[in-house]
């Protein structure tokens, strides 16, 4: 979902770099037990019980970077191990561990343990390097096998990919993938074997052909649109990493926009211009607004019910998706910069001279509310029929908890003009504006400054969750554009626009329908020289073989080899997603330096 823009103001690890799929099987026999959630003794007609794993089988391993001291000279591949563990089985007569190189077997016994055992370590002594294994663990004698619940633990090294630090399409990593070979395999090897990217990281790609974005919105983490001061509409299918210009019936200054979903969107601009799409921007159609005013904002609560606000207090409504627009009496002639609707009945708009108006009947009547300020209120965002926030000149932020009957000033911590505000919920709000200022609230009451990494003005936000938001702006009216994204609620903001990256592919053998409860990327790397100011680093993760990508911010490298781990389970959360796993390492605004990788790995449980 999106908000309308305001008008512009005058190694942890191992030798067995294996892919482990641990399949936990339960068998009920006299004096035996079942691994997993079921405990105790049981017999049934077929002498079998249904296995149920209590939790994902843990994989524990050691890489030279995780030792103390890090990277000791004696660190070798033989130090790597993989450990599987399980829930204790009361009354068990013994535990048997079997291993195979294919999910269907054949399985061979590699350990027989006491019935009290809850863990087993498979080491370099018995396991081949860089081989994928499957494990079955039994309580009692494995003389028959019930249909097993599948529980998967994968430890995935890259098996292919591109070095595209030059930004021209990339050079494929080459093999052979052996420890004495080159490239990718180094990223799965212990003992200090490394890979350095082929060229220096360079400057970030130009955003939107150098145009100035007035508004940006996303339907999901991949599909986004941006409208510019120069009159163009651009679309992205990879979360803002790259953009394609779309054809529109006209090219006015665009001020506001809205995408209700991946198909239905609207844009408003100068001279009463409104265009709409029902196919995600493949085609745009002009609509007749009946106004010649600058139309600053649009908000739609369905594919049919929309409102548009603008200069001179203009308020328009449509009940048929914009086929026809009808003027409403806003009760003001002041410019209305922003509008926020939470239902087909309840809307608020804000604008010049502290103006706030509201309706509870779909705009049949609008009523002025007392804001308590004369500052221009460039943005307003409502999350319910009672809770709204407005932001404007001189750092003003106002809030209401009763639908606007009363508005209360909050301390923003800045005197800079705030040109935009969006609240994803009552406990996740952002406001931004002059010179790149961003403030955020996690309780709807107090506000804390965040580092945007720019001195450009921020014109708008679009938030997909309490953690994932975009901020868009430019260096003044019509100036060079700016786009930043956060995936951690604003602790870090990074530029998703980049054409230079390292990309890694994986070839996991995934057990069908296996649950995925954890997915963690481990990176061990350093920089040849310290990255310059403005450098931002992030990873992109795909669950569909590169069709779409989701970004996760990480820290810039330093000149000391260090380990970073990133949870990506929000994207890699099913067996299907694991099968489609691809990973990118992206540096934006990088100064001239190279990255050296000692480990790249993804762990799935």
Image (tube, grey):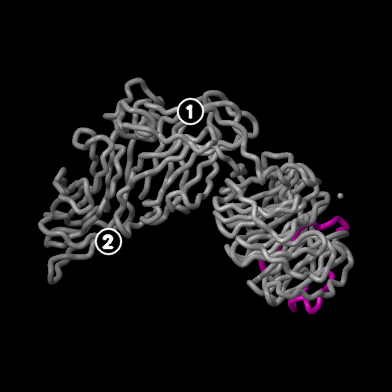
The N terminus sits in image quarter:
bottom right
C-beta proximity under 8 Å, tags 2 and 1: no
* Residue 261 position in % (x across, y down): 59, 64
State the image quarter where residue 71 is shown: top left
Residue 117 circle label: none
Is 331 or 369 nearer to us in this picture? 331
Please report the residue visible at 61 percent of the width from the left and 50 percent of the height from the top. 244
Please report the residue visible at 15 percent of the width from the left and 70 percent of the height from the top. 44
Reading the image, the residue beneath label 2 is: 52
* Residue 298 position in % (x across, y down): 73, 65
Is 410 or 478 nearer to us in this picture? 478
Q: How many marks?
A: 2
Classify mark 1: residues with Cα within 10 Å, few (<14), some (14-19) or many (20+): some
Q: Earlier in the sequence, mark 2 or mark 1?
A: 2
Secondary structure mainly formed by the magenta segment: loop
Task: Name the side, left or right, on which 457 lies relative to 556.
Answer: right
Please report the residue visible at 44 percent of the width from the left and 52 percent of the height from the top. 543
SS under mark 2: loop
SS under mark 1: loop
State the extent of the magenta-drawn residues as a range: 358-384
| Residue 371 part of the magenta-drawn span | yes
Which of discs 2 and 1 lies nearer the camera? The answer is 1
Q: In this rendering, does residue 96 appear at all?
A: yes
Residue 198 circle label: 1
Q: Is residue 383 above or below residue 206?
A: below
Is 77 or 582 nearer to us in this picture? 582
* Residue 360 position in % (x across, y down): 74, 76
* Residue 600 position in % (x across, y down): 41, 37
């Amino acid at each position: 979902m999106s908000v309308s823009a305001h008008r512009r103001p005058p190694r942890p690890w191992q030798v067995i770099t294996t892919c482990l799929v641990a399949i936990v099987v339960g068998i009920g026999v006299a004096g035996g037990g079942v691994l997993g959630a079921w405990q105790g003794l049981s017999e049934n007609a077929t002498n079998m019980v249904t296995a149920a794993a209590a939790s994902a089988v843990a994989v524990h391993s050691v890489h030279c970077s995780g030792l103390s001291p890090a990277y000791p000279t004696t660190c070798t591949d033989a130090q790597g191990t993989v450990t599987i563990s399980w829930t204790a089985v009361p009354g068990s007569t013994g535990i048997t561990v079997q291993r195979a190189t294919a999910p269907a077997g054949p399985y061979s016994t590699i350990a027989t343990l006491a019935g009290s055992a809850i863990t087993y370590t498979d080491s370099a002594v018995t396991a081949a390097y860089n081989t994928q294994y499957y494990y079955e663990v039994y309580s009692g004698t494995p003389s028959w096998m019930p249909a097993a619940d599948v529980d998967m633990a994968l430890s995935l090294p890259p098996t292919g990919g591109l070095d595209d630090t030059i930004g021209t399409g990339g050079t494929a990593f080459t093999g052979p993938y052996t420890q004495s070979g080159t490239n990718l395999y180094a990223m799965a090897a212990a003992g200090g074997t490394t890979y350095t990217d082929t060229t220096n990281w360079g400057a970030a790609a130009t955003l939107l052909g150098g145009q100035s974005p007035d508004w940006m919105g996303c339907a999901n983490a991949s599909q986004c649109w941006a409208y510019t001061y120069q009159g163009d509409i651009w679309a992205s299918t990879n979360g803002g990493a790259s953009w394609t210009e779309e054809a529109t019936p006209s090219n006015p200054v665009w001020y506001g926009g809205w995408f209700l979903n991946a198909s239905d969107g609207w844009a408003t601009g100068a001279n009463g211009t409104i265009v709409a799409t029902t196919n995600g921007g493949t085609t745009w159609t002009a609509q007749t607004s009946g106004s010649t005013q600058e139309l600053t904002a649009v908000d739609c609560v369905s594919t049919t019910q929309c409102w548009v606000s603008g200069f001179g207090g203009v308020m328009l409504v449509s009940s048929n998706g914009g086929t026809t627009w009808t003027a409403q009496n806003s009760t003001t002639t002041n410019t209305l910069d922003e509008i926020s609707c939470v239902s087909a009945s309840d809307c608020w708009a804000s604008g010049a001279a502290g103006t706030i108006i509201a309706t509870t009947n779909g705009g049949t009547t609008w009523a002025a509310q007392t804001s308590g300020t004369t500052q221009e209120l460039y943005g307003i965002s409502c999350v319910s029929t009672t809770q709204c926030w407005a932001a404007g000149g001189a750092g003003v932020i106002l809030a209401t908890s009763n639908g606007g009957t009363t508005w209360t000033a909050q301390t923003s911590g800045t005197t800079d003009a705030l040109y935009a505000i969006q609240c994803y919920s009552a406990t996740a709000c952002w406001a931004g504006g002059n010179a790149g200022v961003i403030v955020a609230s996690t309780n709807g009451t107090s506000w804390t400054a965040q580092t945007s990494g720019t001195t450009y003005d921020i014109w708008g936000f679009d938030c997909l969750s309490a953690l994932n938001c975009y901020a868009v702006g430019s260096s003044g009216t019509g100036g060079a554009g700016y786009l930043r994204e956060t995936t951690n609620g604003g602790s870090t903001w990074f530029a998703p626009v980049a054409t230079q990256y390292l990309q890694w592919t994986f070839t996991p053998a995934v057990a069908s329908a296996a649950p995925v409860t954890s997915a963690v990327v481990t990176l061990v790397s350093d920089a040849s020289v310290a990255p310059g100011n403005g450098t931002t680093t992030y990873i992109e993760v795909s669950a569909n073989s590169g069709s779409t990508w989701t970004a996760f911010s990480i820290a810039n490298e330093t000149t000391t080899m260090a380990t970073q781990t990133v949870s990506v389970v929000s994207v890699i959360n099913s067996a299907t997603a694991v099968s489609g796993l691809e990973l990118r390492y992206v540096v934006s605004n990088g100064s001239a330096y190279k990255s050296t990788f000692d480990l790249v790995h993804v762990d799935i449980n």
